[in-house]
Amino acid sequence: MAFKRVLFDRIEQIDISNLTFENLRAYYGTGQAILLSGSGRNKKYGYRSGIQTELGDIEISVWRKLAKRLVIRNNDQKLLSCYKKWLKNTKNWLKPEEIEREALEMYTYQMKDNTEWYDYKAFNEFWENFKN
């Protein structure tokens, strides 16, 4: 699959009314050095981290905000909490910000409904107990 090489660094650059699971799915992380200031030997660089989606390369904090908007729009806050709890229990080495990112990735991939996921049955049993 060829992805669009479009960079989104601000939420205002994206039409949020058309957000879907499919166009927010995280295919892989991106990164690039960016020139902050200076010239010649006095250049100062930073680093931009992003997520490649069908929409394009979205800066990671913007992607998180968009994914959370999708959660709210679909009234899936409890499901996102369940994904986080699942990750805390199954991948206890992850840092809190990594748990949130992975939970949002699981949400955009709709892992709860993916019968090919190796943890499909175990997670759905966990989800049934969690939501009650």
Image (cartoon, rainbow, N blue to C red):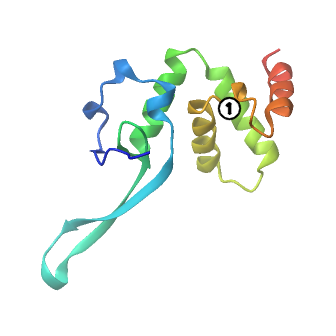
Residue 42 coordinates in the image, percent (x, y): 18, 81
Q: Quadrant of residue 100?
A: top right
Q: Is residue 48 left or right of residue 69?
A: left
Please report the residue visible at 44 percent of the width from the left and 45 percent of the height from the top: 1
Name the quadrant of the C terminus. top right
Q: Where is residue 82 in the image (x, y as percent from the top left)?
A: 73, 29
Q: Residue furthest left?
A: 39
> Image quarter for residue 77?
top right
What residue appears at the point 80 percent right and 40 percent down from the top-left corner? 118
Q: Which residue is drawn at 68% across and 21% down?
A: 78
At 32% from the left and 34% from the top, the residue drawn is: 11
Q: Residue 88: x percent and y percent?
A: 76, 44
Vertically, is 44 above or below 8? Answer: below
Amino acid carrying label 1: it is: Met
User: Helix, strand or loop at disc 1?
Assistant: helix
Which residue occupies the foreground of this view, 15 or 99?
15
Q: Residue 19, how many percent across, how many down? A: 41, 24
Local crowd size for mark 1, using a 10 Å CA cut-off: few (<14), some (14–19), many (≥20): some
Please give the residue where the numbered disc 1 appears in the rendered image: 111
* Count of labels in the image: 1
On the picture, is 56 further left or further right than 116?
Answer: left
| In the depicted structure, whether residue 38 falls above or below residue 119 | below
> In the visual, does 55 lie left or right of 85?
left
Choose between 121 and 49: the one closer to the eye: 121
Which residue occupies the extreme bottom position in the image? Answer: 41
Residue at the far front: name it.
Answer: 1
Relative to 47, does residue 11 appear above or below in the rendering? above
